[in-house]
Image: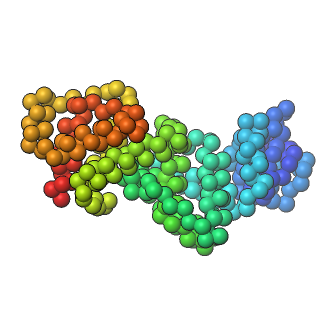
Amino acid sequence: MFLVKITKILNNNAVIVKDGEEENIAIGAGVGFGKRKNDMINQGKIEKLFVLKENEKLQQLLLRIPEEHLALSEEIISYAEKQLETNLNDHILLALTDHLSFALEREKQGIHIKNKLLPEIKVLYKEEFEIGLWAIQHIKDRIGIEMPLDEAAFIALHIHTMKIKGGDLHKTVRQTAVVRDMVETIKDYLGIRIKVDDIAYERLITHLRFALSRAKNEELHVMDEEMFMMIKQKFAVSYQCALKVAETLTEKHGVEIPEEELGYITLHIERLRKQ
């Protein structure tokens, strides 16, 4: 049985321990309950360990938020890792707990923040959004606070960006916002309403994301020249709409969509027009 010494109690589920010359933040159910500074604890009770020097913001957060907010965050992370069958980046504990605690305090005050990217997040990050839905139901069951669907989408973004290859949160939000702008351009140009639960919408959103990714990485989605010319002629309205999307992208976001890609975008727009 390996013991470590507590140097500071943060709350019932988090303490600072000293291992040799290094101080760590130790997190685990009841790890600090009934303990005092200089008490020894069994390392087996520690579920997660963070080097204090690299995680001072986490220490500050744990000192100022309710314990149940940390517990909820850990439960959501644990559920997400099981569902995705992968370990999330350790930084998610700080990012998600900080976000969740603030969101819960806002909800108590009746302040509701709308997530403008909700329709796109539901399609682009399906697995993560399902986890977000589980999370808001779990929060309601545990502490009786009912969170809106917008919050499920916020949680989904945090989880996505903390997957091993998820990327940066700001980049993910920006990419999702760019896709939303592309959809808005299509709606405005055609003067149509798009049903967000329609399979054609899902296909469009998914293709626009990959088209955007390919454009940024300068990868071509090659289409036969003869086929491309036929699409331009047969679906002239949808092609002009695709051109408008490309023009808006360049003007607003500095992203260039290759001509070859426009053929595929035209087909998705045409499918929406028919419906």
Q: Determine if residue 142 is in view.
A: no
The one nearer the camera, 233 or 72, is 233
Q: Which residue sits at x=23%, y=45%?
A: 241
Q: Looking at the rendering, which quadrant does residue 232 occupy?
A: top left
In the rendering, at what x and y percent does residue 135 appear? 53, 61
The one nearer the camera, 256 or 217, is 256
The one nearer the camera, 262 or 136, is 262
In the picture shown, does residue 209 fall above or below 275? above
Q: Which residue sits at x=48%, y=45%?
A: 173
> The C terminus lies in which quarter of the figure?
bottom left
Label total for image: 0
In the picture shown, does residue 141 fall above or below 3? below
- In this view, the residue farthest toward the right is 38
> The N terminus lies in which quarter of the figure?
top right
The colour scheme used to paint the residues is rainbow
In the rendering, at what x and y percent does residue 141 appear? 57, 71
Left or right position of 155 against 181: right
